[in-house]
């Protein structure tokens, strides 16, 4: 698809973003954003995709006839290692909000995720993500595992683990963060694929389901944390 300078300015306006904020969120330069908006640069397909995907993650979509609109419920798919890193960036940005703190109303919950797969697919970015999450204050991510003995990334002190036999037969792991619900697909595809649904209702429903399992699960603090599986 093509986007016009007017659409780009309007989309920024809906989020009250500066060019620098859009540049940071999309991975582009502020100068590139400026040139597109001034009509002196015709963006390549990859640049358009980065802009469209960035706004989609923030519930803004581009329409025909120079239109833009907020979309309360959207679906975004992240592909491959690069997409996986962008997904973790999205989780981190959510974790920085007061609502993600232990006293907040939108804590981060994770079910049946194998941390070894995260480390294998993120490589050195797993260490970067763990370090930045550990620096956040009052943020504790709850993780339900399907095994009593489980792999855990080094120094992931921001995570609290519990074991639930009920998750052992759940093959598709998921994340709930902010107003988003993410399904993470590792084994069925050659590269990781993450389907993120932006919906406050869906996120709320899965948080409630998660807490039912959490309250009936076993504290895993004394379990064996496997270094290699």
Image (cartoon, rainbow, N blue to C red):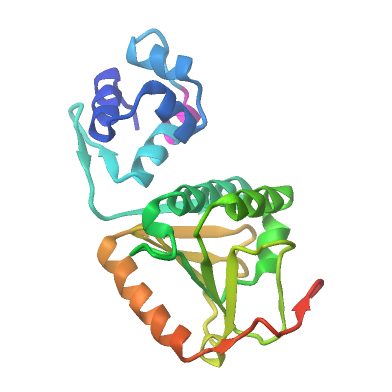
Return the x and y of residue 223 as percentages of the image width and height. 71, 85
Query: Which contiguous range is marked in magenta?
Result: 44-49
Q: Residue at x 59, y 77 (%)?
A: 161
Residue that extends furthest to the top in the rendered view of this protein:
40
Q: Residue at x 35, y 38 (%)?
A: 55
Return the x and y of residue 190 as percentages of the image width and height. 64, 60
Q: Residue at x 36, y 74 (%)?
A: 206
In front: 24, or 3? 24
**Where, quadrant-wise, is the C terminus in this rendering?**
bottom right
40 part of magenta stretch: no
48 part of magenta stretch: yes
Return the x and y of residue 207 as percentages of the image width and height. 37, 73
In front: 97, or 6? 97
Q: Is residue 222 above or below residue 226?
A: below
Return the x and y of residue 68 as percentages of the image width and height. 21, 34
Q: Is residue 85 above or below residue 141?
A: above
- Position of 188 with respect to 56 (left or right) is right
């Amino acid at each position: 698809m093509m986007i016009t300078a007017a659409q780009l300015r309007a989309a920024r306006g809906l989020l009250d973003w500066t060019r620098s904020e859009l540049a940071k969120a999309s991975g582009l330069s502020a100068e590139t954003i400026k040139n597109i908006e001034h009509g002196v640069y015709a963006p390549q397909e990859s640049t358009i995709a980065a802009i469209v995907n960035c706004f989609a993650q923030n519930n803004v979509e581009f329409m025909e006839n120079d239109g833009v609109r907020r979309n309360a419920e959207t679906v975004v798919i992240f592909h491959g290692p690069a997409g996986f890193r962008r997904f973790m960036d999205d989780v981190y940005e959510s974790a920085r909000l007061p609502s993600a703190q232990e006293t907040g109303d939108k804590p981060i919950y994770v079910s049946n995720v194998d941390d070894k797969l995260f480390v294998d697919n993120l490589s050195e970015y797993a260490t970067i993500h763990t370090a930045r999450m550990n620096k956040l204050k009052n943020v504790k991510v709850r993780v339900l595992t399907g095994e009593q003995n489980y792999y855990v990334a080094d120094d992931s002190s921001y995570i609290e683990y519990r074991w639930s036999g009920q998750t052992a037969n759940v093959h598709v792991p998921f994340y709930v963060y902010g107003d988003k619900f993410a399904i993470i697909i590792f084994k069925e595809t050659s590269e990781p694929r993450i389907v993120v649904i932006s919906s406050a209702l869906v996120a709320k429903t899965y948080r409630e389901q998660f807490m039912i399992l959490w309250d009936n699960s076993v504290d895993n603090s004394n379990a064996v944390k496997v270094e290699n599986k």
